[in-house]
Structure formats: structure tokens, C-alpha cells
């Protein structure tokens, strides 16, 4: 029998969407299921079996936290533009107020596919119309000036929220520093960043060791040092931003009534940070 082909890095975007669709009451994402397919269902079963069965609800709570946070800020007219770096197949544009302007940024293969699918679903009235601007970026090239020009041409001087989910884990610290410097160039005082990362202690857990095994078997050969964890102090020490909220899977489970099934050692505990640009 032919050996099964490993999942491609960009295909992991299907996994995140599929996980969000498995508990809609928790994630409040009623459109993520559109991305589900036979292949993604097979990978999800393997992922939950080999890494952590709690991963369904960790992804759902991540979506719920940022969805509720952005909704509140939009209602207060503190945010008019949502800029999603590494947007994958997230469906925030269709879960938030139609007045919001969306800038979706990712690798060309993600953007081309997502744009095509969303256009077809909107034509068939499966999805409502939204103000979405897609920007494909080759991050291996010097992209910053061109990207900056495109973003400013869309957002103008409107207050914005930058969302970066599931990206920092795959970057090194120098790349992360450059990214936050870039965010600072885009934003003005009063704007927000929502960020997701793992803390350093995660690498000591059983769940992380299982994740490394899964990535090596299913995605590509890697080692622990290829993946970034970030201490809370990194966010607290941002020179032009103030950390105004910090949650994790456990605090959000308590808030939203999610019953945790596994012990801490078996959970990939994501941390969620909300930063606001200060006047300094």
C-alpha cells in the first residue's frame, strides 16, 4: 500500500478551523465547519489521539476570547479595522459587525485559496458580504515596505486591532522583535494587539513532547529549539505597549464554564495577551 503523504505546513490551517467547528457552543464560530473535509478529519483524529484530546477546546476558547474581545472594542468604537497576520482560515469577518474592515494577511497559497473559497460561498449566499482585503506576503523576502504601503492605503487613520494567532510559535526571537516593531509602525496610540503564545514551562510537559513527536511524524523533522516559547515579561516590556489583559486555557475555561478533562501535564496551555499602544 502506498505510504500516506505527510501533511503540508500550510494544511495545518485546516486543522485549526476543524477544531473550532467541533464545539460551536464554546467557540461561537458557526462558519469554521465550511473548511472541514475528509482529509482534515483524518488528521484531526490523529492529532487528538497522539497529542492531546483537550486540543478541541483550547482552540475553541482561543477563538472565543478574541471574538468577544474584538466585539466589545468594536461596540465601543475603539476598533474599526481588524488586521489578521497569519489569518489562515479563520472566519472572524463573518462573526463580527459588518461595519468592520478586515485585512487578511498570509502566505500566497493560503490567501489565494481562502479568497477563492470565500468568494464562492458569498456568491451562493452561504456567507454574508464583508469588507475584506486580502494581502499575500512572501515572508522570505523583504516585504515590510510594500506591506506597510498596502495596509495604510486600506486602514488610513482608522483605529485598528492586530491579531496574531498561531504564528509566533514558528518564529525565532529576532523575527518576533521585527514583527512587533512593524506593528508599532502601523499603529497609533489607543490601538490594540492580540497575541497567542506558549510559556517556557510548556516544553517540560508531556503534551509538548507528544506534540514534537506528532510534528516529526506527520509534518516535518524538527527539534524543540525550532519552536518559540515566550515569557510574560516579553509582553510587559514592550516599550510602546501596555499589557492590559492576560488569559490562558484555565482562566478562560473558568470564565466560559468549560469542563477540563485532562491534567495540566497533558494540555497544551495557550496564553492570550491583549496589548494597547500607549502615548509614550
Image (cartoon, grey):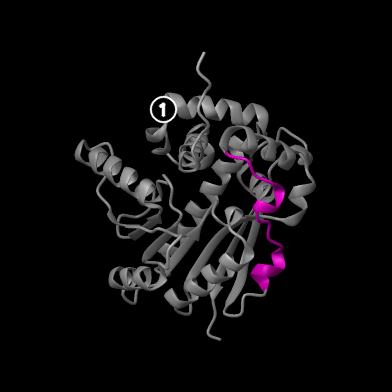
> In the rendered image, which quarter is residue 220 located in?
top right
Q: Is residue 64 left or right of residue 94?
A: right
Front residue of this view, candidates 18 and 94: 18
Find the residue positioned furthest to the left: 123
Front residue of this view, candidates 216 and 57: 216
Q: Residue at x 72, y 42 (%)?
A: 208
Crowding at dot 1, Cα within 10 Å, few <14 / some 14-19 / many 20+, comes out as few
Q: Position of residue 153 (x, y in %)?
A: 28, 72
Q: Position of residue 81 (x, y in %)?
A: 37, 65
Q: Residue at x 31, y 69 (%)?
A: 150
Q: Residue at x 26, y 38 (%)?
A: 121
Magenta stretch containing residue 223, yes or no?
yes
Magenta stretch containing residue 215, yes or no?
no
> In the rendered image, which quarter is residue 160 located in?
bottom left
Find the residue positioned furthest to the front: 2
| Region rendered in magenta | 220-236
Residue 94 vertical placement versus 211 (above, below): below
Front residue of this view, candidates 215 and 135: 215
Query: Residue tagged by mark 1?
Result: 37
Amino acid at each position: 500500500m502506498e505510504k500516506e503523504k505527510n501533511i503540508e505546513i500550510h494544511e495545518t490551517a485546516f486543522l485549526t478551523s476543524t477544531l473550532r467547528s467541533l464545539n460551536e457552543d464554546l467557540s461561537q464560530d458557526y462558519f469554521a465547519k465550511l473548511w472541514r473535509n475528509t482529509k482534515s478529519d483524518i488528521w484531526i483524529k490523529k492529532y487528538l489521539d497522539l497529542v492531546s484530546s483537550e486540543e478541541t477546546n483550547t482552540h475553541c476558547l482561543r477563538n472565543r476570547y478574541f471574538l468577544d474581545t474584538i466585539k466589545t472594542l468594536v461596540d465601543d468604537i475603539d476598533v474599526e479595522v481588524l488586521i489578521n497576520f497569519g489569518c489562515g482560515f479563520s472566519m472572524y469577518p463573518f462573526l463580527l459587525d459588518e461595519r468592520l474592515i478586515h485585512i487578511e494577511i498570509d502566505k500566497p497559497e493560503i490567501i489565494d485559496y481562502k479568497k477563492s473559497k470565500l468568494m464562492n460561498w458569498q456568491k451562493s449566499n452561504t456567507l454574508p458580504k464583508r469588507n475584506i482585503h486580502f494581502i499575500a506576503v512572501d515572508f522570505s523576502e523583504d516585504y515590510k515596505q510594500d506591506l506597510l504601503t498596502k495596509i495604510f492605503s486600506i486602514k488610513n487613520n482608522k483605529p485598528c486591532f492586530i491579531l496574531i494567532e498561531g504564528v509566533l510559535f514558528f518564529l525565532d526571537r529576532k523575527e518576533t522583535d521585527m514583527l512587533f516593531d512593524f506593528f508599532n509602525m502601523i499603529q497609533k496610540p489607543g490601538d490594540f494587539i492580540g497575541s497567542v503564545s506558549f510559556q517556557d514551562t510548556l516544553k517540560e510537559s508531556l503534551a509538548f513532547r507528544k506534540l514534537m513527536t506528532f510534528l516529526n511524524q506527520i509534518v516535518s523533522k524538527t527539534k524543540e529549539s525550532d519552536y518559540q516559547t515566550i515569557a510574560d515579561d516579553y509582553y510587559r516590556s514592550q516599550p510602546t505597549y501596555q499589557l492590559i489583559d492576560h488569559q490562558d486555557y484555565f482562566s478562560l475555561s473558568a470564565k466560559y464554564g468549560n469542563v477540563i478533562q485532562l491534567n495540566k501535564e497533558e494540555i497544551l496551555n495557550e496564553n492570550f495577551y491583549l496589548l494597547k499602544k500607549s502615548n509614550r
